[in-house]
Image (cartoon, helix red, strand yellow):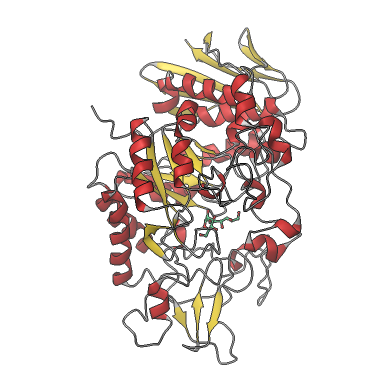
Amino acid sequence: APNNNWWRGGVIYQIYPRSFADSNSDGVGDLPGITAKLDYVASLGVDAIWLSPFFKSPMKDFGYDVSDYCDVDPLFGTLDDFRTLVQTAHAKGLKVVIDQVLSHTSDQHPWFVESRASKTNPKADWYVWADAKDDGNPPNNWLSVFGGSSWQWDTRRKQYYLHNFLASQPDLNFHNPEVVDAILGTVKFWLELGVDGYRLDTAPFYFHDKELRNNPGRGGAKEGDNTVSDVNPYGWQWHVYDKERPENLEFFKKLRALVDQYPNTTMVGEIGTDDSIATMAAYTSDGDKLHMAYSFDLLGKDSSAPYLHGLMQKFAEKSQGGWPSWALANHDVERVGSRWGGPERNLQKLRLAAAFQMCLRGSPCLYQGDELGLPEADIAFEDLQDPPGIAMWPEYKGRDGCRTPMPWVSQAADLGFGDGKTKAWLPYTEAYRPLAVDVQDKDAGSHLNFYRQLLQWRRTQSALIHGEQTLLPVHSQVMAFVREHAGQRVLCAFNFSDQAATLQLTAGQQPAQVLALPGLSGGQVEGQGLVFEPFGGLIVQLA
Ligand code: TEU
């Protein structure tokens, strides 16, 4: 029988098409390149792939600036290439989730070209236009996530338009019902082509505050201070008017009604905001909005047990049955191999973190190359491609360091990314040579084979996929919780510190059997307690 809930607890593998595999040797990865590597992806034991955008785009934000929602950019291939990719993935038992960048378009999108032409054209109100203040300044203090004001002056209309990211990514006006209808039409297009779901880019950003009120400062920001800082996070668009506004939830219901017409489909909303937990819960409760909410809360530096505990506790308190997707990395942040692994790329800790992610209630999301334990690539300023990186260097070095080509073949000049001769859009990372797929494939003890074993093992543990999750009390070193399903109770405990640790269990937590997870080590049962080496972990079936 078809499993309508494959996404509940399913593992998602994120592919960044530009950097995965280059079939036509133009220096940029493409859809046929991905299709050719699907055996590899299936060998990991994941349930689905999520493809970052491959739609027509001037590539100012590398595809997150869409100029035609219903076509493939020639750089990535054709619609037929996409059909082949979907067929091939399905034949290998992989679901296909695609990225939908609905909040904004490219400034080259015909909708925007028309909208900016005059104040009276039929699409005049499809984007967020506003007059200048009397002194010529933008209507309010909102800031772009990528730096500077989020308002761009347009000389033709003599008005400002809103952009939450680059100026070449104008924000669609979702308060206009015509825009919502047009967007739902584009979503339907891909459902008809057989996709299994959507990753919704910047889901909290669809609806702006209609009254264009200033973002309030927080905790001591001075009026007029538009710099992004700890005291003024609301200078960004990440403010109270955006996240859980009723219009957004109503839009999700419309999306859900559409998506539900196609069996076995899912949606995961990207909540790329600080303090996302309440928002994640609001978006996924009651089964009538999004299926899953993708959190950024494991994408920072903090991997301490108290932090992780606080996060999971907060989600449990707020969740109302909502469903999270936890990721340790993506194409926007420093690779987990460095961020959590440190300069020495501590494999023991990375394996502990991976096991932790796979044991959590929710749908884990892997980013390409995490399974190889890749560190962040060093990129020289001259090689930078990412606009916010170029703009904010050296305070912020941008996102290129996690986007360099996948290393497939250790000995090939281009690491097996293309035909061996072409220069790729980002430099090949020499440090990836010894970590290439062909090397790790052959090594039974490699990080890659650890991941394969972890994912295979998880498939046999229904408590980890379907179980309820109960946290143990907060502990300064050990993050621990129990997953419970169909009478089976599994205790998962992870020492996230570089010191030995012990964890006392209560009388109700009688260890019955240690569940051997290859690659996870450094933990053992001693009477009514668990003892751990630094970064040791243990998974125990309770009586
Ligand atoms: O990212 C949204 C988001 O919140 C990011 O801006 C993130 O905080 C930032 O990249 C700093 O790490 C999505 C996409 O994932 C990103 O690649 C796009 O650039 C962005 O939307 C605009 O579409």
Q: Is residue 9 left or right of residue 358?
A: left
**Looking at the figure, which quarter contains the N terminus?**
top left
Q: Is residue 247 left or right of residue 309?
A: left
Q: Is residue 320 above or below residue 79?
A: above
Q: Is residue 73 above or below residue 10?
A: below
**Rendered image quadrant of residue 447:** top right
Q: Residue at x 46, y 55 (%)?
A: 201
- Where residue 344 appears, as percent x and y from the top left, is 77, 33
Image quarter where ligand 1 lies: bottom right
- Where residue 90 appears, as percent x and y from the top left, is 34, 35
- Where residue 304 appears, as percent x and y from the top left, is 67, 35
Is residue 476 visible in the rendered image? The answer is: no
- Where residue 75 appears, as percent x and y from the top left, is 49, 56
Q: Check the image and name the residue furthest to the bottom.
A: 134
Q: Nearer the viewer, residue 254 or 196?
A: 196
Q: Is residue 269 above or below residue 14?
A: below
Is residue 342 visible in the rendered image? The answer is: yes
Q: Residue at x 43, y 63 (%)?
A: 103
Q: Nearer the viewer, residue 174 or 407?
A: 407
Label count reads: 0
